[in-house]
Image (cartoon, grey):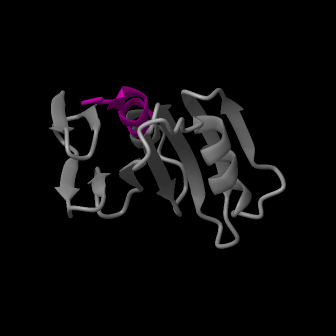
Amino acid sequence: MKTFENPGKCFRLTYPPDWNLADDGDHVSLWHSKDGGAVTISSARHRDPKYSASAIEHCKGFVSKSGDQRASVEGNTRIARGRFTDSKGIRWYVHVLAHGRYGVLATYNYARKPNLEEDEQAVKILDSITIIVS
C-alpha cells in the first residue's frame, strides 16, 4: 500500500499501488482505471478554533442534496457514512470525518455496473483516511 499525507490538507490515507492519485491543490482524486469510479477528497479547517464540526450533520447535508429518498446515512459526530444514487444513476459512497474544527469529505462514485473488487478497494481507501491535527 502507498501512503498520501498532506498536513496542509489535514488528512492522510493509504491506497493500493495500482491506483492513480492526483492532487490539484483543492482536491485529491484517486482512480483505478479510466472506466472505473473515482475517489475525491477535500478538507477544511474552520477559522474559529472553538468550532466543533459534526461528521453526521455534514454527511446528512451532503446526502440530502441528492434527492434520493432511499439514501442512507449512519455515524456520529466524528465519522459518518452515506450512500445514494443520484438522478443520473450515479452511485455514491460518502465518508465524512470531523475532529474539532477540522473536516474531511470523501466520496466514491461510479456510473457503471458494480465492479466488486474496485468497490472494495475504494471503500478501504475511504476507511483509511485519518485527520492530521496540527
- Residue located 34% across and 31% down the image: 131
Instruction: Say which quarter of the image contains residue 15.
Output: top left
Provide residue 119's location: percent of width, then percent of height: 46, 41
Query: Which contiguous range is marked in magenta?
Result: 122-134
From what the image shows, is residue 78 above or below residue 119? Answer: above
Q: Residue furthest bottom?
A: 88
| Quadrant (top left/top right/bottom left/bottom right) for the N terminus | top left
- Using residue 7 as the reference point, say whether residue 129 is left or right of it: right
Query: In this rendering, is residue 3 above or below 89?
Result: above
Quarter occupied by the C terminus:
top left
Please name the residue shown 42% across and 43% down the image.
Answer: 104
Instruction: Give coordinates of residue 11: x percent, y percent.
Output: 29, 37
Tell whether position 130 is magenta: yes
- Observer-nearest of 49 and 60: 49
Residue 124: percent from left, percent from top = 40, 30
Say which of 116 and 85 sits in front.
85
Residue at image location 77% in from the left, 64% down from the top: 67
Residue in the foreground of this view, choosing between 111 and 78: 78
Asked if residue 52 is positioned above or below residue 94 in the image, the reply reads above
Would you say 42 lies left or right of 86 here? left
Residue 36 is left or right of residue 107, and the answer is left
